[in-house]
Amino acid sequence: MPTHAERGFLETSMESAIRSLRADDELLVVANGASAEYLAALGAIVHAPARLLVLAEAGVAHARNAGLREATGGCVLFLDDDDLLIDGGVDILRRELEAHPTWSGVAGEVISFDGADEQRRDEYATGGTLITPLRLLGRSITTPGAVLLRTDVVRRVGGFHQERVPTEDFDLWLRMAADAPLVGVSAPVLRYRVHAAAASTNVLRMSAQALTTFHLHAGAYSAWRFSMAMRRAATRMAGYHQMKLQGLARAHARSGQWTSLSALLVLLARFRWLSLRSRVRARVWRMVNRRAAAGTGNRGEPPVPYRDQSTSTLDVAE
């Protein structure tokens, strides 16, 4: 659990984690770049079976990597200090991971809440959904706290990258899914707290970094045969962030924040170009494929990545 400053949620998050521990599990709370006042408060808050690690360097990726280096278990879960594990959820993830030794990790479903209501998100098919890189490019996992990972795989792919913050988890999922199967199961495991101080509320920064991370990984799937799946991924990614950016742009226009508005409009244009380019590429590929099939008298099904393994419709061509 990384923690940087007092937000009033750490104690209840720790309690939810402690209830999820087995006798041989450990709970590491990593204070990263915290003030002297907060460190003094943590001394009273963090108690056995939890252990406090103090890291001078700030940054959530640095904190998670410090915990990863210190971890002694075969699997690891990165819980934010404002989220709550659902009782029994980690046991479900653990049983799935133990039953499937080739999986790199298993994700559970998330319920978001803001004190007023709850809403299910990150839903997976009964029996499991293979979370492929192409599926992730269109829809990332909400938070690391809902995913149980094999410690050795996280270390092998290099852990979290600080330069990818605030989409450092999106970047990690893409690297892990390309290394070994990452699977989502139909079981709620975490309550995701929505509040004003959350990193995800910085829409401009989140969207800009998400686009950078998308381009970084999408290059691995630039072959024409991936164009249909990439069109779906790009359209979904662009649609999600455009909706957020448009709402923020309207608010900035009403308040006369012209400098930030111009940055928002530039980013919006980049997402629209991403969506348009992927649709054009997919249409060209489909036309060429159909002509080739017509010439041989065999239309067949176009080659699509992960068709044999994935239950996700995002990875299946029309």
Image: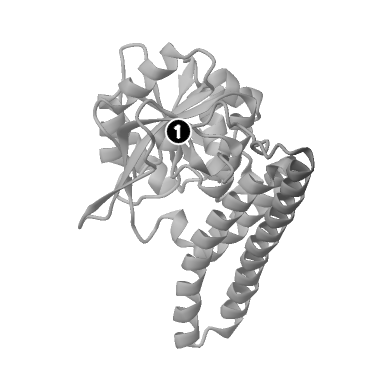
Residue 39 sits in quarter: top left
- On the question of residue 213 being in view, the answer is no
In which quadrant is the N terminus drawn?
Answer: top left
Front residue of 202/276: it is 276
Q: Position of residue 295 (x, y in %)?
A: 79, 43
Judge from the rendering whether residue 129 lies leftward or rightward of residue 88; answer left or right: right
SS at mark 1 in the image: loop
Residue 184 sits in quarter: top left
Render colour scheme: one colour
Judge from the rendering whether residue 245 lies leftward or rightward of residue 293; answer left or right: left
Name the residue carrying label 1. Answer: 78
Judge from the rendering whether residue 96 lies leftward or rightward of residue 293; answer left or right: left
Front residue of 119/56: it is 119
- On the question of residue 14 being in view, the answer is yes
Q: Is residue 30 above or below residue 99?
A: below
- Farthest residue toward the front? 297
Front residue of 285/45: it is 285
Q: Is residue 295 above or below residue 156?
A: below
Residue type marked 1: Phe
Numbered disc total = 1
Q: Position of residue 234 (x, y in %)?
A: 61, 54
Give the residue at x 64% y 26%.
Answer: 179
Give the residue at x 58% y 73%.
Answer: 264
Judge from the rendering whether residue 254 lies leftward or rightward of residue 84; answer left or right: right
Q: Position of residue 166 (x, y in %)?
A: 55, 51
Q: Residues within 10 Å of mark 1 (few under 14, many from 20)?
A: many
Front residue of 259/236: it is 236
